[in-house]
Amino acid sequence: MASTDLAQAVLVQLRATSAVANAFGDTWNPTNNTGVMKFFFDWAGQPDEPYLTAIEAWETYEFMTRTTGKTLAPYIATGQLQVLIYQSDRQAARALGVLVAAALNDQTAAIAWTGFTLMNLRMARAEFASITVTGPNVPIAFNRILTFDYEYSGSITEP
């Protein structure tokens, strides 16, 4: 199944990297909706740790000049993707971050979605964010945040 956007393409790459999938315990098979899901984009319920969520923090666009008579307007999108790792042990959270960085850094050929070309994806920084309460009766977790810079090219159809 071809990915339809950056979010889906990133999750496909993480699941395809066996070291990452095994370390998190992700066995999710999106084809038949079976297994244990540990990778989420934009939102996650309360899965057992470790797990990760990812968000597109921001994105800007540089549109190219449209050729007269053409309806496609090409552009370059630049943005940041953040991967948030939740783990009950600080060192384990750091180690999972290293695996995720290796799975995503410079994987422009592997991370693909229909109609777009990923030109750059590279981790810019990593940090721990403090979490005091993750929910009622939920143990304290460490939150490792990896921030990746990215660029991709695409086009939109104009009327």
Image: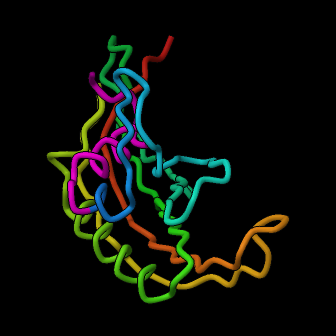
Instruction: Examine the rendered structure and indicate whether residue 120 appears above or below residue 15.
Output: below
In percent of the image, x 24 and y 65: which residue is there? 105
Instruction: Examine the rendered structure and indicate whether residue 24 appears above or below residue 71.
Output: below
In percent of the image, x 33 and y 29: which residue is there? 3
Q: Position of residue 1 (x, y in %)?
A: 27, 22
The segment highlighted magenta reads 1-19
Q: Which of 102 and 36 is in front in this view?
A: 36
Asked whether residue 136 is in view, the answer is: yes
Q: Nearer the viewer, residue 43 or 79?
A: 43
Q: Position of residue 153 (x, y in %)?
A: 30, 41
Q: Where is residue 37 in the image (x, y as percent from the top left)?
A: 47, 44
Q: Nearer the viewer, residue 44 or 26?
A: 26
Instruction: Examine the rendered structure and indicate whether residue 141 appears above or below residue 6.
Output: below
**Taken as a whole, is the magenta stretch helix, strand or loop?**
helix
In percent of the image, x 42 and y 82: which residue is there? 92
Count of numbered circles on the image: 0
Q: Position of residue 14 (x, y in %)?
A: 31, 52
